[in-house]
Image (cartoon, grey):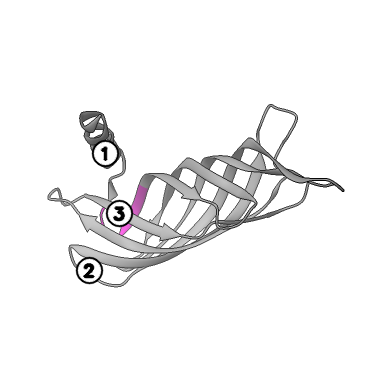
Amino acid sequence: MKKATLILIGVLCMVLPGKAQQKGLETSVEFNAGVGLDENIKYTFGINAIAGYRFNDLIFAGAGIGYTYLNGLYYTSYGNSSDYDSYDVRSNLNVFARAKINMSKAKISPFVQLDLGGTFGIASNSVKMANGLMYEPGFGCDFKLKEQDNKVYVMLGYKGMKYQY
């Protein structure tokens, strides 16, 4: 069990590196997971691909596309004898713009970022997530690796989705 966990972490670190802070084109692939902070979502996980332009060591702007798998609230029943919530899994395609500001040029560089865009339901089952707005403010740290062109980053954010069925 411990071996499988260490291998999984190693794979994630090899996939996550993006081009380090230099002027020009910057790309990254990121894996994400989350837990719901309210009764609407139990958990999510997904993958994003981002490409954009780094204007200098501190400022980045780009666009991304991602897939999110979530277990979310489908229906709430209010009956005389009992109330219950029905949950269902959903698949969403996210298309977004990203703005990111690093706080320093150091090997470990804190940053803040904001993703704004749309989410589109792509589930094949009868319960589909409706289209809507997606926003995700976050903060974290970039960790430059020994290779000058690679980094790994860790981020904590809040992903909000506004939609109607």
Residue 61 spot, x, y in % from top left: 44, 60
115 or 127: nearer the eye? 127
Residue 24 spot, x, y in % from top left: 33, 56
Query: Which residue is denoted by mark 2 in the rendering?
Result: 105
- Report whether 60 appears left or right of 110: right
Tag 2, which secondary structure? loop
Q: Residues within 10 Å of mark 2 (few under 14, many from 20)?
A: some
Quadrant in which residue 103 is drawn: bottom left
Q: Are marks 3 and 1 in contact (CB under 8 Å)?
A: no
Q: Distance between the residues labelled 1 and 2?
A: 26 Å
The outermost residue toward the left is 146
Residue 10 spot, x, y in % from top left: 23, 37
Q: Are marks 1 and 2 in contact (CB under 8 Å)?
A: no
Residue type for callout 3: Tyr
**Residue 2 in view in this figure:** yes
The outermost residue toward the front is 81
Query: Which residue is denoted by mark 3 in the rendering?
Result: 153
* Residue occupying image coordinates x 42% and y 49%: 51
Image depth: mark 1 or mark 2 in front: 1
Which segment did they paint magenta?
20-27
